[in-house]
Image: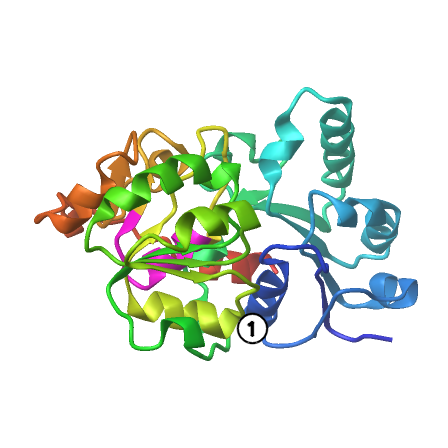
């Protein structure tokens, strides 16, 4: 049987494993696992469920039993916005969370600060800033430069799968006008998109899975980071968060979620269209916010107290 903390993650795509490792670091003890037997889930001293708005809600009966036994459980919600829709699935999840929160030993933490603070005490115990904005000092990290970009520096980094949520068509149609600004695309893309991009000057493609160590190296040598999302995207971005931690300028959508929630970061490049991105990146100054107005995104102590 597992003693102390059990941090249950998932094998889904995303930052779930990193969140589990972060919570383990903050707690200073316990085990991180993608799965566990029922005896460990019920019997561990403290249970932290990282996929708190999806798969791990199915563990609600065991969480209630734990609460009756006086054992604390914490759900971490990465996609809390999915709970607030009008679909039957969203309504059922909200009712279930309200039931769980009737037990004093159950907590529900969302990474949608400050957007969903209005729901604290109703569907959420506490909102915190996305850990991707502040987690690097608390997790082990190593750096390994991808062979495709050896020797390159100062590029615009387009990291992650290239899809419609990343406004890929607008980006692909604009990138040829960036002139001498190098662009590195790192992450899986469709073969059709690769064909469109591979013959454009100053573009490097890393069309494959990119490891965490390679991602850190890509950030270390980047000049700018692309975090320009479709208007429909209403959740935190790990790509944006890591850029903030590393002090890099970030390209985001004007009026989009990232600007609304994190607009005080001094190195935001906010655009309503990518049409003039190349000229803006090549120009000086970029019109960053006064650093004196910057807010702290570090919510490590808040999360530590909740664990």
Residue 271's x, y, as percent?
27, 34
Magenta stretch encompasses residue 241 = yes
Residue 229's x, y, as percent?
43, 38
Tell which of 286 and 187 is nearer to you.
187
Q: Is residue 190 visible?
A: no
Residue 173's x, y, as percent?
36, 37
Q: Is residue 272 left or right of residue 106?
A: left
Tell which of 51 and 206 is nearer to you.
206
Residue 79's x, y, as percent?
60, 41
Q: Is residue 189 visible?
A: yes
Magenta stretch encompasses residue 149 = no
From the viewer's perspective, is residue 107 above or below residue 117?
A: below
Specify the segment rendered in magenta.
Answer: 239-250
Task: Read off the residue under disc 1.
Answer: 25
| Residue drawn at 19 percent across, 55 percent down | 180
Tell which of 199 and 122 is nearer to you.
199
In the picture, the quarter occupied by the C terminus is bottom right
Q: What is the secondary structure assignment of the residue under circle 1?
A: helix
Q: Is residue 252 left or right of residue 82?
A: left
From the viewer's perspective, is residue 295 above or below residue 143?
A: above
Q: Quadrant of residue 136?
A: bottom left
In the picture, the quarter occupied by the N terminus is bottom right
Q: Quadrant of residue 225?
A: bottom left
Q: Is residue 102 left or right of residue 80?
A: right
Q: Quadrant of residue 5?
A: bottom right
| Residue drawn at 64 percent across, 77 percent down | 29
From the viewer's perspective, is residue 244 above or below residue 215?
A: above
């Amino acid at each position: 049987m597992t003693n102390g903390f059990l941090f249950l993650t998932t094998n889904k795509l995303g930052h779930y494993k990193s969140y589990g490792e972060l919570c383990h670091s903050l707690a200073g003890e316990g085990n991180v696992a993608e799965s566990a037997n029922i005896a460990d889930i019920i019997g561990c001293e403290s249970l932290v469920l990282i996929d708190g708005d999806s798969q791990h809600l199915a563990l609600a009966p065991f969480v209630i039993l734990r609460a009756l036994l006086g054992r604390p459980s914490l759900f971490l919600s990465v996609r809390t916005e999915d709970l607030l829709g009008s679909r039957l699935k969203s309504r059922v999840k909200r009712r279930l969370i309200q039931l769980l929160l009737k037990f004093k030993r159950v907590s529900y933490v969302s990474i949608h600060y400050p957007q969903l603070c209005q729901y604290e005490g109703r569907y959420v115990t506490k909102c915190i800033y996305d850990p991707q904005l502040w987690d690097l000092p608390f997790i082990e990290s190593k750096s390994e430069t991808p062979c495709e970009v050896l020797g390159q520096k100062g590029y615009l980094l387009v990291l992650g799968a290239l899809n419609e949520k990343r406004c890929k068509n607008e980006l692909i149609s604009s990138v040829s006008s960036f002139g001498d600004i190098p662009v590195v695309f790192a992450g899986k893309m469709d073969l059709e998109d690769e064909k469109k991009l591979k013959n454009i000057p100053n573009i490097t493609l890393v069309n494959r899975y990119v490891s965490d160590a390679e991602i850190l190296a890509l950030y270390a040598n980047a000049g700018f980071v692309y975090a320009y999302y479709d208007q429909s995207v209403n959740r935190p971005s790990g790509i944006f968060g890591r850029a903030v931690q590393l002090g890099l300028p970030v390209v985001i959508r004007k009026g989009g979620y990232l600007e609304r929630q994190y607009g005080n970061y001094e190195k935001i490049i906010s655009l309503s269209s990518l049409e003039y991105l190349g000229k803006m990146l090549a120009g000086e100054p970029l019109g960053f916010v006064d650093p004196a107005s910057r807010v702290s995104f570090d919510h490590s102590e808040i999360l530590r107290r909740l664990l």
